[in-house]
Amino acid sequence: MADARNHMKVDVPDIGDYSDVPVIEVLVANGESVEKDQALIVLESEKSTLEVPAPSAGIVRNLKLKVDDKVSQGDAICELESAGEKTESTEAAEGAQTQTPSSVPAQEAAAVSPDSEPDAEPASNDDAAAQAAGIEVITVPDIGDFDSVPVIELLVAVGDQVQAEQALLVLESEKSTLEVPSPKAGKVIGLKVKLDDKVSKGDALLELEVTTGGKKSAAKAAPTKKESPVSNPAEAPFRKEKEALKSSAQALGAQKSLESPSKSPDSSAHAGPATRKFARELGVDLIGVKGSGPKNRILIEDVQKHVKQRMQSSVVTQKESGIPPIPAQDFSRYGQIEEVPLSRIRKLSAKHLQRSWLNVPHVTQNDEVDVTELEAFRKKANQEGDVKLTLLPFIIKAVAAALKKYPEFGSSLSSDGERLIMKHYCHIGFAADTPEGLVVPVVKDVWSKGIEKLAKDCADLAAKARDAKLKPDEMRGGCFSISSLGGIGGSHFTPIVNAPEVAILGVSRGVMKPVWDGSQFQPRLMVPLSLSYDHRVIDGAAAARFIVYLVELLGDIRRLSL
Ligand code: CAO
């Protein structure tokens, strides 16, 4: 049966003498319900902006325009599917598409799995039903423990044909990126998100017109309501170095265009065209501006106030930090140069390290530990056992014991600096060097693990770190960090506290040294230790006690079993 719903074409109205006017905002998306007179797009002609309203209520279909398209009177904008009167056939079609998300607003669509089995009304075998079931809303899959993850790349646009498993967009959480693949082949008919939107599990991402088997209903394609339409994120590919470099560059490009004057402020913000234009010119994202007009409408004064506040706070920050900026230089004056974009991880850790360095008053306490006996034990254990033991798991175990005795070293300072947060768990991070930069995987529940289990955890986490496969959860929750450069070389160094932690242990390469035993010099393997700590939380005396205790534990690992 043919789809008998009313489709009304909406064109660009008479806009006076102008032609080829740029579309500066698209305020609706395919599948969105609009009221009569609700603005659909905003055009900008020399000195004014113009909202084009919907001539009637309905559902937006076949949206033809995107930001920066140029239009003239009579050009097609979209079609409006009337949401009002229903004919018998439309009712039949709608009845059969109880689970068709394309017919409901994004919010509701997200709550309905496109693959859900209709338990009330099974899909009839008519064409309308097949057509309805062919549109699916792709939602954010289970992405672990976190919410509000930013969309950092949109890899498809409306009208694109995609293959099953083809990446649709990229989400970013802390130090990992996650591609959301398409569950099926099809045509993208509507985007529900844009760059920098924050999404959580179940949020609608886009509408896909499934091309394979028009008659095959979504209900038949997926067995249960609970099943996610997108593959398990644990199996989704975390990007490797090359891809990360490429996407960093792309993200950088996208970011640039978002900040440029042609930026389209978030259409969900309640503001008129003049305010939007003003915000766009200043590069202000309206989503962060508090509106003081009727129904919290954002006014030009609100944007001005927002900018003033932002400027004042950045001046204060700069004054407080007292850091004169490093002047830019044209290095090409001195010789040939090349600019290499930084990987996302490097940029993130740069920010984090600078924040820690600027906020935490650091002191570093150095010492050396005699690991001669430990090394002998380790070598023997490596010959006999299956799990390779390096020095690291012993150090982690010793740190865990020291944290039990001196728990303030695993604490965090509350953000107002008024309280110390003591933790009754022991998760220890270790810095891992990867091709993309520094990451700090966290070994959980160290108190309950033996050396072999810790060695295995470290090896697994370090391998995942190198392959950029660490999940966000595997880099969170640390109480204390260890930075071991022992496998590489060098003597003491000053590690930077991994705030909000309050202490970090740097481990350098062990070397044989003559050590006086009271009557003669003995050759002993000495490993340099460097304990950096937050002097707001830890006193020098406490730091000295902590490191001396570590030296005792590692000097005689039998103590670790006590
Ligand atoms: N002294 C002497 N030898 C040491 C040592 C030390 N302090 N620490 C490790 N070694 C030895 C190991 O025992 C191993 O020797 P064997 O092969 O004979 O058993 C060898 O060096 C290689 O160890 P490794 O580095 O592969 O393994 P690890 O468990 O010691 O370290 C990891 C793992 C992930 C910490 C390490 O690979 C790494 O990435 N280190 C760099 C960390 C970093 O970048 N820190 C700086 C952060 S601030 O910018």
Image (cartoon, helix red, strand yellow):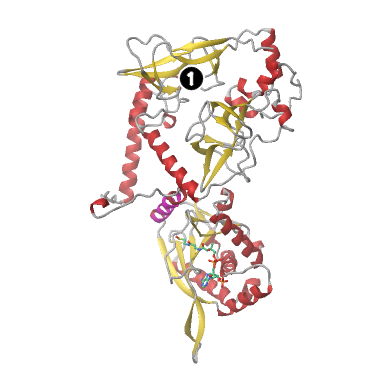
The image quarter in which residue 188 lies: top right
Residue type of the residue flagged with mark 1: Lys
Residue 352 seen in the figure: yes
Q: Secondary structure at mark 1?
A: loop
Q: Is residue 562 visible?
A: no
Query: Where's residue 50, x and y in %?
Result: 38, 16
Q: Which quarter of the rendered picture does the C terminus lie within?
A: bottom right
In the image, 75 versus 482, the foreground residue is 75
Q: Nearer the viewer, residue 9 or 52?
A: 9
Residue at position x 60%, y 12% from top? 83
Q: Which residue is mark 1?
A: 64
Residue 186 placement (x, y as % from top left):
60, 29
| Residue 497 spot, x, y in % from top left | 46, 59
Q: Residue furthest toward the bottom?
A: 519
In the picture, the quarter occupied by the N terminus is top right
Q: Is residue 351 magenta?
A: yes
What segment is highlighted magenta in the picture?
348-357
Q: Is residue 115 left or right of residue 471?
A: right
In front of the other: 59 or 242: 242
Q: Looking at the picture, does residue 359 appear above or below residue 124? A: below
Magenta: main secondary structure: helix
